[in-house]
Image (spheres, grey):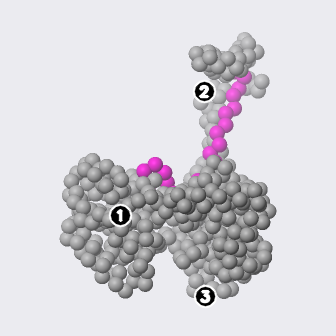
């Protein structure tokens, strides 16, 4: 059977497709115009330096405020422009996200072990040294982005974390976005957006050395800039439009299911939303309920387009088929609202983050209030990778410590393999040690 709406084949139990995505096409960030524009901008900025960054900011974003860096006091006072209720919510999200990241960090353990007498191996978790975070602030400023990027990086022990966010006026950026960065422990913050922000961080044009890693979501141009800069700097994910999927059965409330599908479709007109259910009646009820809720939704121009063009509904014959279907879809966000949520938690393998039960919703994580990270793989990437976490900012660096007494257990094997490969220089490094230490019968642990 073909799961043609998602460009993947499905082999398994039977299912019925009640609603298929109407259109497909090339993702926005891969359109030739986007690729060409980003390539030209990166070239100009690499040659022109910070002056080119400032000029792009002036022309593209209307920036006229002079220096793009926010001083420490201005950054701290961004919270003064917010209501007490919003400040309290952001403070809760920042604290919970860093708490969850801290729990993850404590479960990542350094170790060493003796593989054989005289051969000790292991690894140590060493943080990346410099991270640049991009914090979007367009029509929908994603306030929790700083929690997931800046805050988690600092929890991992990254010494230098800077953040860039686009101006929302000629002299300032979004105060709530920058207050979130402040709460997350950012070291330096800059009012600069788009491709020029990514380039400035990657090329070291903001008074810092070039960043080792760039993180954070953005529009099609930002995503394409990350793709073109990958290799020069590390990246978190090349995420596409936000995705949501729901597994539900006849115990689910179609009003809740429809609302949660639209909750993520609201992110953009290309955001996929999928329902897999074992109940045909529920499937039809959800389709009708989505149409009803769209009538008075203020963002119906966005969510409605996403549902029309990228929405899918599948009816699976049983729970096992529902699992197979969903593992092919491999969605970014996956909600499970069934009579047997434990079954799905134990059997599903491909998703960015899982939300179990009718009292869960993706929005709780999106806004940072549960503490888990919402920087997640899209476009089927969950089949092979996980989302951003504290571990992404830590390098498990291996080491080996070899005693002199272990030489004759290792060197002859390496010499034999190297000889077959005709890599003489490799062979010599082993043979020299055989010659130097092979006749040494000392049993004490001594470095050569």
Q: Is residue 22 left or right of residue 383?
A: left
N-terminal-most mark, 1 or 3:
1
The answer to whether residue 335 of the structure is visible from this angle is no
N-terminal-most mark, 2 or 1:
1
- Residue, disc 3: 83
Q: Is residue 61 left or right of residue 22?
A: right
Which callout, 2 or 1, points to the residue nearer the camera?
1
N-terminal-most mark, 2 or 3:
3
Mark 1 residue element: loop
Task: Name the spot of residue 445 as percent of width and height, x first.
Answer: 73, 26
- Residue, disc 1: 23
Q: How dense is the environment of label 2, judged by Cα within 10 Å: few (below 14), some, or many (20 and up)?
A: few
Task: Name the spot of residue 419 as percent of width and height, x first.
Answer: 62, 15
Q: Is residue 240 left or right of residue 288?
A: right
- Residue, disc 2: 116
Point 63% across, 67% down: residue: 194
Point 40% across, 80% down: residue: 300
Indicate yes or no whether the magenta region holds residue 389.
yes
Point 58% across, 54% down: residue: 227
Task: Name the spot of residue 338 as percent of width and height, x first.
Answer: 29, 66
Task: Name the spot of residue 125 as percent of width and height, x first.
Answer: 64, 48
Q: Is residue 304 left or right of residue 183?
A: left
Res 257 quadrant in image: bottom left
Which callout, 1 or 3, points to the residue nearer the camera?
1
Region of the chain picked out in magenta, as a range: 382-405
Q: How dense is the environment of label 1, judged by Cα within 10 Å: few (below 14), some, or many (20 and up)?
A: few
Please report contact status of discs 2 and 1: CB closer than 8 Å, yes or no: no
Q: How far is the residue under mark 1 from the one under mark 3?
A: 42 Å
Point 43% across, 76% down: residue: 302
Please report contact status of discs 1 and 3: CB closer than 8 Å, yes or no: no
């Amino acid at each position: 059977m073909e799961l043609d709406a998602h460009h993947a084949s499905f082999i398994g139990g039977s299912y019925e497709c009640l609603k298929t995505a109407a259109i497909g096409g090339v993702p926005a960030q891969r359109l030739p115009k986007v690729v060409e524009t980003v390539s030209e901008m990166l070239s100009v900025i690499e040659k022109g330096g910070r002056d080119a960054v400032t000029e792009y900011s002036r022309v593209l974003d209307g920036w006229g405020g002079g220096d793009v860096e926010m001083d420490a006091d201005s950054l701290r006072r961004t919270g003064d422009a917010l209501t007490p209720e919003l400040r309290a919510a952001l403070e809760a999200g920042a604290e919970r996200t860093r708490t969850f990241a801290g729990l993850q960090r404590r479960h990542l353990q350094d170790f060493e072990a003796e593989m054989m007498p005289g051969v000790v191996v292991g690894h140590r978790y060493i943080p990346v040294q410099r991270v640049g975070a991009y914090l979007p602030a367009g029509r929908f400023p994603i306030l929790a982005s700083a929690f997931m990027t800046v805050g988690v990086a600092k929890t991992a022990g990254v010494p230098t974390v800077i953040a860039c966010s686009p101006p929302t006026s000629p002299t300032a950026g979004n105060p709530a976005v920058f207050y979130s960065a402040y709460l997350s422990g950012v070291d330096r913050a800059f009012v600069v957006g788009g491709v020029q922000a990514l380039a400035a961080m990657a090329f070291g044009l903001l008074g810092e050395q070039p960043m080792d890693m760039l993180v954070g979501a953005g529009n099609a141009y930002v995503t394409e800039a990350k793709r073109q800069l990958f290799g020069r700097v590390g990246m978190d994910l090349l995420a596409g439009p936000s995705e949501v999927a729901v597994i539900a059965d006849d115990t689910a409330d179609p009003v809740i299911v429809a609302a949660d599908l639209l909750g993520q479709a609201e992110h953009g007109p290309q955001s996929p939303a999928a329902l897999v259910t074992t109940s045909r009646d529920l499937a039809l009820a959800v389709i009708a309920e989505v149409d009803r809720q769209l009538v008075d939704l203020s963002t119906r121009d966005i969510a409605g387009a996403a549902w029309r063009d990228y929405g899918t509904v599948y009816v699976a014959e049983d729970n096992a088929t529902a699992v197979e279907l969903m593992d092919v879809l491999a969605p970014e966000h996956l909600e499970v609202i069934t009579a047997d949520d434990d079954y799905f938690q134990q059997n599903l393998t491909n998703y960015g983050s899982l939300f179990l039960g009718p009292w869960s919703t993706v929005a709780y994580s999106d806004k940072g209030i549960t503490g888990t990270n919402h920087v997640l793989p899209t476009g089927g990437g969950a089949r092979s990778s996980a989302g951003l976490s504290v571990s992404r900012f830590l390098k498990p660096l291996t080491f080996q410590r070899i005693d002199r007494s272990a030489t004759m257990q290792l060197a002859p094997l390496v010499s034999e393999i190297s000889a077959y490969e005709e890599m003489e220089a490799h062979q010599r490094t082993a043979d020299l040690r055989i010659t130097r230490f092979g006749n040494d019968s000392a049993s004490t642990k001594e470095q050569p």
